[in-house]
Amino acid sequence: MTAAAERVVATNALGLRPTTSPGPFSAFEWMIARRYLGATRNGNSFSLISIIAFVAITLAVATLIIVMSVMQGFRITLLDQLLGTNGHAFIQSDTAIADYDGLTSSILSVPGVSSATPMIELPVYASAERGEQGVIVRGVRPDDLRKIQYITNPEHVAAGSFATFGVGDKGGNEIAIGSGVARALGVYIGDQVTLISGRGAETPFGRTLRRKVYTIGAIYNVGNSQYDAVYAFMPLEQAQLFFNYGDTTQQIEVRVEDPENIRSYWDALLQAAPGFSIEDWQQKFSAYFGALGTERFVMRLILFLIIIIASLNIISGLIMLVRDKTGDIAVMRTMGATQGAVMRIFILSGSMIGFVGTVCGVILGALFVTYIDAIETGLSFIAGRDLFPAEVYFLEGVPAKLEIGEVALIAGFSLLASCVTTIFPASRAARLDPVEALRYE
């Protein structure tokens, strides 16, 4: 008996020959597809090519989920810190604003506006016994500052207190600085720091320098090293005196209930502040978030290509499988299997690899994102250095946000790529001539 005939008898003995033509994706096709993933004819183990394809897809999907979750975490964290420490819109003028109390009352009447804060924001040169640094000083009213939770909330106060901020003649002489500024100057609570500004008195030779010594009353820590290392807060009355603004202010900082849709407030704000100009946070930080969005898009595109490359392993695996199972394909065809049935069998074989690899990749990626802080700490301990320095990334920890929509998009693309890559080798198997295949059996 020939080898092909023996396979026919064995196939019949296993009950694989259908008595009636099965429908598409029947149990018969699923069983054959599962057995063809085996390295041996009895299907007890998996081929090396199948294992490589599975691992490649798993790692590609997990990598894409991890990277996109971290980038989304960066965006959400930075946006939260940005909107938590800065205004959402800024009412400005070419000249100093005199009637800022009346203007703030008018702005507060706009529906959706939660606060309107008169503010002076100017750069100064700060020096202490152990260091010096350029600092941006924000002059605000004490009550307005205490409403900014990212600054005055106890969990963000690294040292000192805001209880005495603004207490004293002309606002007193206490200021609040970021933790990065404190480190650069080498100062702590109760220490003195000298601020130098170029907005001194007018003379025939121009403005003079203004110098004054202030006491550190509070040190805050936002968690963003760029913000903590740049800004300091001063009572508005003291800022008016120090920067020679008299009884005027520089701008009005506006906060709204829905900062993501700040443009919807423009018309009402312009009506409340006629003759003034508006700059919102999207304009002020457009370059920053534009670059972040572009980087996220390019990274997603690159990692999607990695999934495609990983899926190409399925093609090579199925082509080798078709060559190995040529005789079996011919036997099935002589037993009545249609070209469509053969094609679906090999599509199912490749799709199984893609499906299992995608599921495992989603699980691996989700677990990595969930425990990313512990993983970063462990890797830093092994490497003997901080792998995520706050001075470089501006954040004290690795932010990660696992979004269901993003995971679904990644999983769907991986499954689609896995199915598409099976079409060519599956169609090649379906076109196999059983007579030519059995001629040399």
Image (spheres, helix red, strand yellow):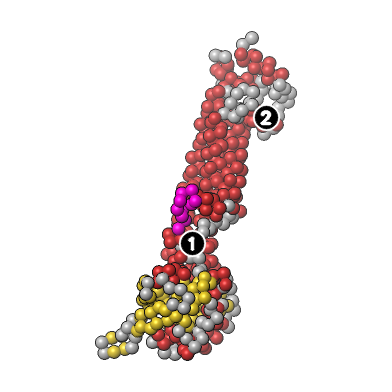
- Residue type (three-letter) at the residue carrying disc 1: Leu
Compared with residue 263, is residue 433 higher up or lower down, i.e. above or below?
above
Mark before the other along the chain sequence, 1 or 2 = 2
Whether residue 14 is visible to the viewer of this picture, yes or no, is yes
Q: Is residue 140 above or below residue 55?
A: below
User: Compared to 20, does 5 lie above or below?
Assistant: above
Residue at 38% over, 87% down: 244
What's the amino acid at mark 2? Met
Q: Find disc 1 in the rendering and name its residue.
A: 395
Q: Position of residue 315 (x, y in %)?
A: 52, 33
Mark 1, residues whose alpha carbon is within 10 Å: few (<14), some, or many (≥20)? many
Q: Quadrant of the C terminus?
A: top right
Q: Position of residue 388 (x, y in %)?
A: 47, 56
Q: Is residue 386 magenta?
A: yes
In this rendering, position of residue 139 left or right of residue 338: left
Residue at (68% x, 20% y) in the render:
11
Left of 212 or right of it: where is 329? right
Q: How many discs mark residues in the rendered view? A: 2
Q: Which residue is mark 2?
A: 31
Q: Quadrant of residue 425?
A: top right
Q: In the rendered structure, which segment of residues is drawn in magenta?
A: 380-389
- SS at badge 1: loop
Q: Is residue 141 found inside the magenta-colored segment of the image?
A: no
Main SS of the magenta part reads loop
Q: Nearer the viewer, mark 1 or mark 2?
A: 1
